[in-house]
Image (cartoon, rainbow, N blue to C red):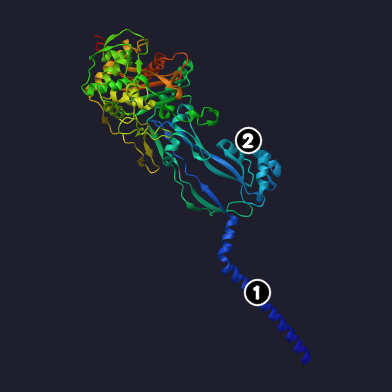
Amino acid sequence: MTKTIRNRRLRYGIVMMAVIALVAVFVIRLVDIQVVQAAELNEQSKAKRSIPVTIYGTRGDIVDRNGVELADSVNRYNITTAPRLVAPFKGKLGGTRVKDVSVDDALQAIAKASGGDVATMQKNIAANPKSDFAYLVKGLDVKHYEAVRDLEVPWLYPEQQSARIYPTGATAGALTGFMGTDGAQAGLEYSYNQCLAGTNGSETYERGEDGVQLPGSTVTKQQAKDGGTLQTTIDSDLQYMAQQTIASAAKELQAESATATVTNAKTGELLAVADYPTVDPNDVDATKDTGAYGSRALTATYEPGSTIKAAIAAALINEGKSSPTDRAVVPYSRSFPWGGRIQDSEFHPTENLTLTGILQNSSNVGITELGERLTQQQRYEYMKKFGLFEPESAIQYPGQPSMQYGATPDWSSQTNINSMFGQGISTTAIQVASVFQTLANNGVRIPLHMVKGCQTADGKMIDAPDVQGTQVVSPAAAQQTVKMLQSVVTGGTLVGMKPISGYNVAAKTGTAEVAEGSKGYGGQRITSVAGMAPAEDPQYVVTVTFTKPQTNKWSSGAAPAFRTLMSQVLEKYRVAPSTSEAQLYPSTW
């Protein structure tokens, strides 16, 4: 009996010791899990059930002067899944009755609703079947997204993002630029990316094993911030008119390219900057001419030809070296001691011309004879004051030529002469427009600009350009030059252009030879017209330029486009007609 009790007690002791040891193991393991490894395991747990979500800050709009959208952001949707949750289910799959839905049936329905590819979806799921994330289809618009959503597939998760569209298409495409997979690629999108770009935020939510978001589990880590609105000076309606006008003319002239600008003479605001050919930012790949990705009016340099004679004439008057009725004896050609020679575009006997007549007939010989009354340095400095030889200070646009010239001209003897009729020097179409804006604005040059500023999401205006005006020549010199330029239209190189009824117009033509590298100048030309109206109080400046026209290589070929566009401008802005006929200076003596 005593032995039996002793054995029983021994067994109890052994059992108790085993229980105590087992409890001790559990306690130690519990302490290890809840204390020692708690942080690590907690993070691992969160990683498995916490789903990160990017909250996209919307990219700001680019708008015209009236608030019309030139570039806009719209919602697009990516459809994602958790491959480990992809499985057959019971559902309607967009129908009216509940049924068994296989994975293949679901993918087929998703592809039909979204326009996606079943094989691609299957490949993405199979790439990592135990993962929590894979893309099925990207970039759906709202219509296609809603079609997918209505399928009610339990293992689909939408991801919202912002996409870029350009409502005016190619009309302002060269100005707005476009976006690519790596961000802003060209135009204002690129130059003002810091203003336009939104700041993405982030949040997380917890998802159960069945893939369903747990209510109340969303935690915002960082708030998203929308980008600013870039306000331009462009008039989208006028931009379209300018675009159509030069495209039609360029095709008729068989020109390689063309540009047009419209400027408010009093403010320096660019109302239209048109290019042909141009890019549709909604379909960039359709544009084979990569030179059309940007605006040639802003970036392409060329020798401007005789449009520069207006600046030389104004400088002569401003320095008291000449006057509209100053007399000159002008032969057809002129030779120089270093062996150089220049001539006028058409043969003529020696003529008695005034400075007005020299502009009217666009005489290379005549403008150099009078222009040499100014020193080389004086002419150079006046050209710079008119806006040549320097970057456009109030325009931020990629690809503009740096044009950083020195304090003194680095010209040969021949270039010194040729520069007075626009050969041997480089300009852009915008710089030529700046010369005529200055003359039209009583000699005050206002930096041409096409952006008013960027209005941030919190209402602040930033990136406003400095458009302080500079007096280049006196009001009298500018007004006399404009009055002389009316003779170009009434009896000079633009005499063949049909008048714009009711308006006095002042303009200058340009026909410049195109340099062909070491071969010198060849047979190709760049033709242009730059002018303003109404001449007695100019409101708007219009320029048109055609590169390498084939059917008409003279500035007369550019005249119809200038007339059409100027007429559209005067009509659109309801400019009051001239009240009297032009009072002209004599052109001969």
Quadrant in the rendering for residue 328: top left
Q: Which mark is residue 115?
A: 2
Residue 520, position as x, y percentages in the image = 43, 21
Secondary structure category for the residue under label 1: helix
Give the CA separation, mark 1 to mark 2.
58 Å
Q: Residue at x 52, y 27 (%)?
A: 289
Q: Residue at x 46, y 49 (%)?
A: 223
Q: Is residue 414 left or right of residue 259?
A: left
| Pick the front one: 234 or 56 | 234
In screen coordinates, is 307 left or right of 69? Answer: left
Which quarter of the figure has residue 383?
top left
| Residue type, label 2 | Gly
| Image quadrant where residue 329 sits | top left
| Residue 83 visible, this angle | yes
Can you name the residue that lies furthest to the left here?
Answer: 320
Q: Is residue 308 above or below residue 463?
A: above
* Quadrant the C terminus occupies: top left
Question: In terms of depth relative to the viewer, which is nearer, 342 or 300?
Answer: 342
Badge 1 crowding class, 10 Å Cα cut-off, few under 14, some 14 to 19, many 20 or more, is few
